[in-house]
Image: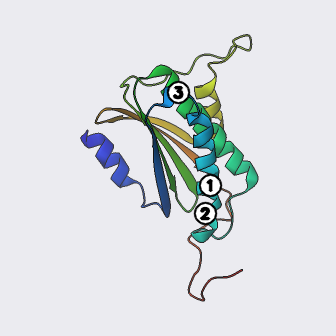
Amino acid sequence: MTDAITAERAAPEPLLSAGVVYGDASRGGAIAAARAFTAEFLAAAPAVLRGPVGDERVELAQLVVSELVTNAIRHTDGPCRLLLELGSDALEISVFDQEAAAPVPRGHDPRRIGQHGVEIVVAICESLTVEPAPEGKRVRARLSLPTGRTGPADTRNGPTG
């Protein structure tokens, strides 16, 4: 438990963060809701960044969220929590669930139908980590943002636009 707390504190404070819990995720709708939540969250990014997050990055973030939430729903019991944390150069996507075992990427097999989620996340993101959490685990993916977003928006002269 101490490691997870230390890992969270080691990261810089996010500029914007939001989370949601899907209590009975197995009943359906959680994946679509998580994708919509992610799009809405990133739509608020211009308030803290130097501009909007590009459509491609929003779509990639939604794909990562879909894969991580799908894994939590399919392979664990109980609720899952999605946490989005926006930094000046990256989006941290975390999914908490009640299963301690880490997801395992499978080897490349073009004949396999499905079960490519972890492979997709690894290919898209700069990092993927699994950390112990008090009641399960936290799967955290880091998706970079375009290099033009180097810091918080300058609000000294008031709002623009």
Compute the Cα span from label 1 to label 2.
7 Å
The kind of residue on which mark 3 rests is Arg
The residue labelled by disc 2 is 44
Residue 149 in the image, given as x and y percentages of width and height: 64, 65
The residue labelled by disc 3 is 27
Q: Nearer the viewer, mark 3 or mark 2?
A: 3
**Side (left or right) of 142 relative to 58:** left
Q: In the orientation shown, which residue stands out farthest toward the left?
A: 2
Label 2's element? loop
The residue labelled by disc 1 is 40
Q: Residue at x 61, y 63 (%)?
A: 45
Instruction: Please tell me whether residue 52 is drawn above or below residue 117 in the rendered image.
Output: below
Q: Residue at x 68, y 68 (%)?
A: 51
In which quadrant is the N terminus drawn?
Answer: top left
Label 3's element? helix
Look at the numbered discs 3 and 1 and tell me whether their residues touch, using CB distance below 8 Å.
Answer: no
Label 1's element? helix
Residue 20 in the image, given as x and y percentages of width and height: 47, 46
In which quadrant is the C terminus drawn?
Answer: bottom right
Instruction: Please tell me whether residue 24 is drawn above or below residue 116 in the rendered image.
Output: below
